[in-house]
Image: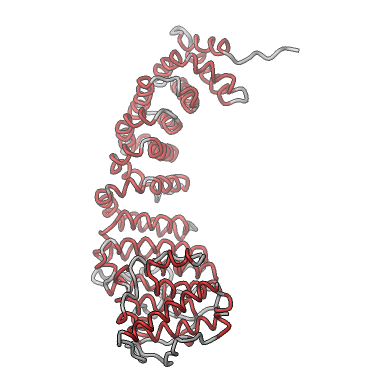
Amino acid sequence: MMATVPLNSSSLLPLLESLEDITAGQPEQTDAYLTIVNRLSGDDGTQFLPAVVKHFSRLGKTFQTHISSQNAELSQAALQALGFCVFHANVVSAIPANLAEELLSALSSLVVKSTDKNTCTRALWVISKQNFTPEVVAKMVPEILRTLECIRTREDIQSVVMEHESLNVIIRLLDQAPAQMGEGAVQWAKLVISLVVHSASKVRLRAAAALEMGLPLLMEKQKEVAAIIEPIMSSKLIPELQKLFSTKNETNVLKLWPLFVRLLGKLLHRGGPFINSLLGLEELGFRSSSPNIKKIAFIAWKSLIDNFALNPEILCSAKRLKLLMQPLSSIQVRTEALLLTKLEVWWYLVVKLGANLPAHFEQVGVPLLQCTLGTDSAFPATPAWSSIQSSAVGTTTPKTGAPAFSSPTVMPRLSLNCSVVAGQAYPSIQLLGLEMLLHYFLGSEVTAAAAKNKLTLSLEPLIHPFLSSPPSFTKYASLLISMVRDSFICIGKDAPEALLALIWKNLVSFVSTTIDAGKYQPKSTTSQRHPPRHPSTPHRTDCMQ
């Protein structure tokens, strides 16, 4: 039986000598590189690695010579072997910084000069797989980005594989040298943004991954990046995204939507057809029959809330707030999970309103409480709520695929079904409504109060107090008292005792303070169907046992 020969330095040396021999034939040298590849990628790779580490100073010189060979087979074999070498951290640790920089520079030069698609693709593959130190890579980022810019304009070597590897390079550089990639954000953004609507799914998905990963860096140069997006948004990106949506790529499209909203920034504040075309994509999501697609659309809607919140005047303008409320108040959902998602986004808007919440509570806060705590019949309706229902949303639904927007003078809007029908009452939703009442009573102090009473909160606290004085309580006293009363009846038996006690304590405190201030009136400024009860005791004793 023949003994197995250990893969030590002696097994690499014959290959290395062949590669260094200028008289050796190119087929022989090609085979030598492929043998190195097979050994590094095989089961005995760990035994072969020490030899590569020991002799890489010699091997590196042969790589520099052969990767630019006019013989495509030799060049690509050398590139493949180089890729396996620089992928291994043990090998990289033995490569001097100057040699690593020379190798990266040689790879970039090869991509720019070579006319062979496979050679260019293989060189990009090596760059995407290397594990050189961040310091080395950081120095080479500008040259590599120039290389990517160059191949983007070279039609002679364009291919799906080439574009995919270019994106892999960008993702690798984002991981290794984020600071330098931030400086060059505008350069690589041009490549990534155009590829998110590529016809090949693997390219689209990789471009989306690069865009999401690099978003914090792109936001540092948001205005410059927005200037790249704006000219192609209506002419290229939106039409292609609509096509993708119609071909079962809804999830990918709706996950891209918030990225574009963030990158466009205050450009969306201008209104008109520009934002309308973007809103059309969200409308497709909201009108989908799939609960999962609807959920993604709701989550994406938070990005528009953030966008408008960049300017509080924009967020609080009647028309923008009406737009933000349309999917929240008009879309009926039939599952508990989807309703929770919608309410999460709705509460997000409440929090973002900040100090302006009291001025818009009837438009935003009242319908949210009605949605969580029960039907309209269970709570007093306000004139403001009924007017919102009649004016915020159109009563017609456009034909499938028809654009919902036309005139540039019309404010941004969504064309959605406006039937606001109370669905099934879920205890989890009603408990959220109770917690919302606590947040309205306590404001930012809710966190400390919850901790003191060992109460777990599900919602983000308000930054600014909602009820800051007796007059502010007087305005909504009847409404809040009625909602506390009826919510205790509906869900009190399932609510934590600490939650009920805190709500009751703070309600009584506000009533007492208002009476002491001589401001409290039995009939508040909001019209009510039922007179409020005096809050001296709970309406249902079993709620507070």
Identity of the residue furthest to the right in this view? 1
Picture coordinates of residue 235, whole percent (x, y): 30, 56
In this picture, is 300 found above or below 438? above
Residue 419, quarter of picture: bottom left
Residue 137, quarter of picture: top left
Residue 17 in view, yes or no: yes
Residue 154, quarter of picture: top left
In this picture, is 208 found above or below 427? above
Residue placed most toward the observer, 303 or 411: 303
Q: How many marks?
A: 0
Residue 294 in view, yes or no: no
Picture coordinates of residue 300, whole percent (x, y): 41, 61
Left or right of residue 180, residue 1 in this image: right
In this picture, is 544 found above or below 134? below
Residue placed most toward the observer, 377 or 265: 377
Identity of the residue furthest to the front in this view? 516
Picture coordinates of residue 490, whole percent (x, y): 54, 82
Which residue corresponds to the image point at 39% horizontal and 58% vertical from the top-left?
A: 257
In this picture, is 108 found above or below 457? above
Name the quadrant of the N terminus. Answer: top right
Name the quadrant of the C terminus. Answer: bottom right
Residue placed most toward the observer, 380 or 10: 380
Picture coordinates of residue 293, whole percent (x, y): 49, 63
Display colour scheme: secondary structure
Residue placed most toward the observer, 476 or 1: 476
